[in-house]
Amino acid sequence: MGVVSGERGRLAEDAAAWYLQGKGWQVLGRNQRTPVGELDLVCREGDTVVVVEVKARSGNLYGGALESIGPRKERRLRAAAAWWAAERGDYPCPLRFDVVVVALLGDGSLHSLAHLRDILGNGG
C-alpha cells in the first residue's frame, strides 16, 4: 500500500528539513501560514533567511518542480516571506528562495533529493 498525498508532502518536508539541518542550516519554521500564503520551510543559512519550497515528486524531477512556480506563486511566496519576517521584526533582511525537490518511491521512502538555490533570483 502506498502513501497518500498529504502524507507524501509531510515525508518530503521531513526529508528536506533533515537534509538542510545536515548542512548546518537552522530550521526556523515549518508550514508557516500567513494571511497571504503558506511557507513550507523557513531556514537560516548564515545571515540569510531562506524560504524553501518543498516539492514531492515521483517523476519529471526538476522540470515539473520549477514549472510549478509561476509568476502567481512567486508573488505569493515573496509576499508571505515579507509578512513572516515583518511579524518577527526581521524585515528587511537578506532573503533567498530555494526549492528542495524530493522524489519518493510508492511506499514513501526517499528515492532522491535535489536542492535548487536562489530560484527567484537576486538572493545570493
Image (spheres, rainbow, N blue to C red):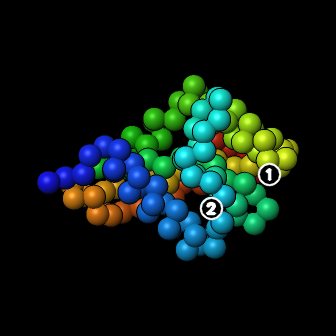
Amino acid at the residue labelled 1: Pro
In which image quadrant can residue 44 be found?
bottom right
Measuring from the top left, give residue 42's x and y in whole percent.
64, 52
Residue at the spot 55% in from the left edge and 74% down from the top edge? 22
Among the two numbered marks 2 and 1 on one chain, the one whose residue lies closer to the N terminus = 2
Tell me the tag on residue 27.
2
Residue 119 visible in the current orientation: no
Question: Quick one: quadrant of the C terminus?
Answer: bottom right
Write down the residue under mark 1. Answer: 94
Element class at badge 2:
strand
* Residue at the top extreme, as displayed: 72
Question: Quick one: quadrant of the N terminus?
Answer: bottom left
Element class at badge 1:
loop
Measuring from the top left, give residue 80's x and y in whole percent.
67, 36
Tell how many labels: 2
Disc 2/disc 1 C-alpha distance (Å) = 16 Å
In which image quadrant can residue 35 be found?
top right
Residue at the spot 66% in from the left edge and 58% down from the top edge? 28
